[in-house]
Image (cartoon, helix red, strand yellow):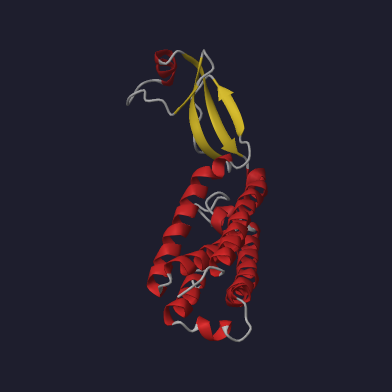
């Protein structure tokens, strides 16, 4: 996915794009031709790899794959990784057109894609509404295959406080009393939320890919030296 940026930037840096543009090839068509090969490769290869990984993950008993619960393998399962690679191609094209230097474009797309991945990692638990459990006792964060991602208390006024600072060794009941709370809550996703989360994230990544592609087509129409 990172090849799109250097591929575009290299031609702009060397000036070889001028030859294509003087042979009745429009800038937009030139850019689409440059991105077509990596896009097809990503769709074909990425879909195959994701399908094989998903099948293997589903077929092998999970007790033979310690630490590989569904939310640990999220980035390799289903449509999200393929959509992410397409987003990377779009971001690479934008980086190449803006930076116009091969090394700089590669660095820019790596930083941009890293920031996108970080943001999605933070947003992922809230892409679809989680299930919430409330209990007078402090719930555990481990156990079944549910993704238990946030625990906290609910005050008598109805305010939620995530992971309240109660001090080391303080009993859960005392922690509730110190914050005028009457129960604990646990936000989690059951295993059945895997595919809704996958498609929600894939939708965001495809939107990023589309926006980046539109931005690249707009940028390539600007006058270039």
Q: Observer-nearest residue: 55 or 63?
A: 55
Quarter of the image where one finds residue 102 = bottom left
Quarter of the image where one finds residue 25 = bottom right
Observer able to see residue 31: yes
Query: Residue 144 appears at what percent x and percent y?
Result: 57, 40
Q: Residue at x 49, y 30 (%)?
A: 151
Q: Observer-nearest residue: 85 or 194?
A: 85
Task: Judge left or right: residue 158 versus residue 56.
Answer: left
Residue at the limit of the structure toward the left, as seen here:
168
Observer able to see residue 60: no
Task: Judge left or right: residue 141 versus residue 22.
Answer: left
Query: Residue 62 appears at what percent x and percent y?
Result: 58, 53
Q: Residue at x 47, y 69 (%)?
A: 96
Q: Observer-nearest residue: 92 or 178?
A: 92
Task: Judge left or right: residue 151 versus residue 32.
Answer: left
Q: Residue at x 53, y 86 (%)?
A: 19
Q: How many marks?
A: 0
In the image, is residue 144 above or below residue 221? Answer: above
In the image, is residue 15 above or below residue 209? Answer: below
Q: Quadrant of the C terminus?
A: bottom left
Query: Residue 45 appears at what percent x and percent y?
Result: 61, 72
Query: Residue 109 appears at what percent x and percent y?
Result: 45, 64
């Amino acid at each position: 996915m990172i090849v799109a940026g250097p591929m575009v930037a290299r031609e702009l840096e060397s000036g070889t794009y001028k030859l294509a543009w003087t042979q009745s090839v429009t800038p937009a068509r030139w850019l689409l031709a440059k991105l077509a090969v990596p896009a097809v490769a990503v769709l074909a290869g990425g879909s195959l790899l994701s399908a094989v990984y998903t099948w293997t993950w589903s077929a092998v008993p999970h007790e033979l794959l310690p630490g590989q619960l569904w939310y640990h393998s999220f980035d390799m399962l289903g449509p999200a990784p393929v959509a992410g690679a397409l987003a990377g191609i779009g971001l690479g094209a934008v980086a190449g057109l803006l930076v116009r230097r091969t090394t700089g474009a590669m660095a820019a797309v790596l930083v941009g894609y890293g920031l996108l991945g970080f943001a999605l990692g933070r947003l992922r638990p809230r892409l679809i509404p989680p299930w919430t459990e409330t209990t007078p006792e402090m719930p555990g964060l481990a156990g079944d295959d549910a993704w238990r991602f946030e625990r906290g208390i609910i005050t008598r006024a109805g305010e939620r406080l995530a992971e309240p600072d109660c001090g080391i060794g303080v009993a859960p009941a005392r922690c509730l009393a110190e914050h005028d709370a009457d129960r604990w809550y646990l936000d989690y996703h059951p295993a059945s939320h895997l595919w809704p989360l996958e498609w929600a994230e894939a939708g965001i990544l495809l939107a990023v890919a589309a926006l980046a592609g539109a931005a690249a087509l707009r940028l390539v129409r600007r006058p270039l030296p």
